[in-house]
Amino acid sequence: MKREIALASLLIGAPLASAADPEINVAGFRAVYEISFDSSDASSGVIGAEGRYVFDVDDACEGYATNERFVVRLARAEEPVVQDYRMSAFESATGDSYRFNRSIDLNGRSGQKAKGKLTIDADNSRTVLDYEEAEDQSYEGPILTPIAHLRQLLTTAMAGEGRHAAMIFDGDVDSPTFYAVTRIIEIDDDAETDGDRIEDLEGLARWKIDTVYYPPETGDEGEGATPKFLFEGVLFSNGVVSDMRLDYIDFALRATLSELEVRDSGC
């Protein structure tokens, strides 16, 4: 199976956005999710799944340090596939600089690796992607880095708006960007979510988010384009996401929040 199963950048009418709102901060936290099988098409060959995803973010005052690991075993009609995804990154507080190092192993064998830096010009007119072991790339206009995207979703949700759209960075060497369109819906106080069991999430505002990821050339509304990925989740006001559904088009996984440690930033 050649497809990558990764969560980087997924934590995720507005125009294309640039810098993150300086008033919106993401809490430092470590979240653990249990991965399970949700559904699949017969053509995918996937008949089950299990695994774990760990997302750790630290508010380092001048920016955010993140570490991710996603290990999943896909049961298939043929032989199973075990994927081990790792990502470490540092993102500036303004979202204009992002250093990253990512790797993916399949069945214990080393797969794609990517290391580099993304930089956005001060006037938001151009984004440069500098890979250490691949060809550099440049783009017209800004591209949102992962935490900047998350902070903009929070800004949009807190403003009572129901839609956010932006070009976002994923880090993959072959397909480093996506056009992400997110629908945001406020959740009723009496609605039940995974987060209800987590003490650090009690009483926080929360929203249902549905994001469609399109190829970058789609632009604007993504009309007529075939989505590459679909994401559903519950976003809390401190940046934690629960109740995740990861839809890879021909099969889907669930990520259930099982542990959460929230840390003070000290900033």
Image (tube, rainbow, N blue to C red):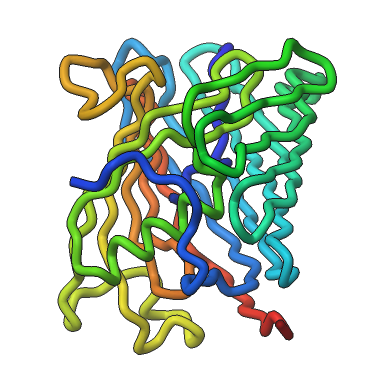
Rendered view: 185 above or below 141: below
Q: Quadrant of residue 216?
A: top left
Residue pictured at 64% horizontal, 61% vertical: 93
Q: Quadrant of residue 85?
A: top right
Q: Position of residue 227 (x, y in %)?
A: 30, 23
The tally of labels here is 0
Could you tell me which quadrant the C terminus lies in? bottom right
Q: Nearer the viewer, residue 227 or 62?
A: 62
Residue pictured at 30% horizontal, 61% vertical: 156
Image check: 125 left or right of 95? left
Could you tell me which quadrant the N terminus lies in? top right
Residue pictured at 34% horizontal, 24% vertical: 214
Rendered view: 120 above or below 260: above
Q: Position of residue 25 (x, y in %)?
A: 53, 71
Q: Position of residue 179 (x, y in %)?
A: 37, 29
Q: Nearer the viewer, residue 257 or 18?
A: 18
The residue furthest front is 123
Q: Nearer the viewer, residue 206 or 249?
A: 206
Image check: 136 left or right of 178? right
Q: Nearer the viewer, residue 201 or 38?
A: 201
Q: Position of residue 149 (x, y in %)?
A: 46, 50
Residue pictured at 41% horizontal, 62% vertical: 242
Rendered view: 2 above or below 52: above
